Image (spheres, helix red, strand yellow):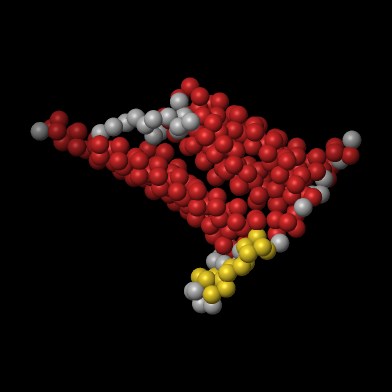
Amino acid sequence: MELLTAENLITLLLLVMLQAVLGFDNLLYISLESKRVEPHRQASIRRLGIGLAVALRIILLFVVVKVLDLFQDPFFAINIPQVIEATFNLHSVIVLIGGVFIIYTAINEITHMLVLEELGHNTKAPASFAKTLALVVVMNAVFSFDSILSAMALTDVFLVMALAIIIGGVLMIWLADHVAEFLEKNRMYEVVGLFILFIVGIMLLADGGHLSHLKLAGYAIEPMSKSTFYFVIGIVVLVEIVQGRYRSNLLKKKAAQQVSN
């Protein structure tokens, strides 16, 4: 019954909102990654992947609560003055690897789209269900660090944090299907989504660099704020909307001119 106190309920609401805000980039990655498997298995990969990821998040939450120092203690350092300086811990290494992988995935998919357009093909061999599922679960763990550490800053009640993760997972399953359907009906936004994913990778690299106190040529790597991240996303989406309408107007004018001629 202690879980139902006003303080815990308010904290739970805040944590669910936090999960939704911090989970946007993760949701986009899952929706895009699921498109790599056969169409009739895409919904399954999203639901099963998020379900397993929720279980992994709760396990990770328990581990982080018990051994937080192991994630923060430095274990490797580089010190070449005015070239590169850094002190890495487990947390920073995981975030950096996640950023590199997401950038690779985004560039690979964008390149594939360009190649398909040049060759005149519109199909791609489906990816392995197990491989895609593993990627969704592992990358969810990478994305979960921020939300877990933020949750620990708001409360020390494990049940509240675990319940927020479960509710957030249910919302992600529901939203993932809607996001995937939107991208399927509006294929032009899939390219926008991949560029946003690229920005997510940059954000993770910046976060990992900041966590490891990375300096390149004497300049410290600063993290990208969430407000900046969402501002950039808003600009990218706005440019695509304006460009799409402008293209539509040009096509209408061209069609009108052909009719008049």
Q: Position of residue 124 (x, y in %)?
A: 37, 31
Q: Is the residue 220 above or below the residue 122 in the image?
A: below
Residue 63 lies, in percent from the top left, at 75, 47
Q: Residue at x 40, y 42 (%)?
A: 109
Q: Quadrant of residue 56?
A: top right
165 left or right of 92 in image? right
The percent coordinates of residue 150 (x first, y second) are 70, 52
> Of 96 and 128, which appears nearest the observer?
128
Which residue appears at 19% of the width and 34% of the height? 256
Q: Residue furthest right?
A: 1
Seen from the viewer's position, the closer of residues 48 and 157 is: 48
Position of 127 relative to 140 (above/below): above
Q: Where is residue 229 shown, x and y percent of the image?
A: 53, 54
Q: Residue furthest left?
A: 261
In the figure, residue 220 lies in which quadrant?
bottom right
- Give the camera-side residue of 7 and 213: 213
Q: Residue at x 48, y 22 (%)?
A: 40
- Identified at 10% across, 33% down, the residue is 261
* Relative vertical location of residue 210 with respect to residue 131 in this rendering, above or below: below
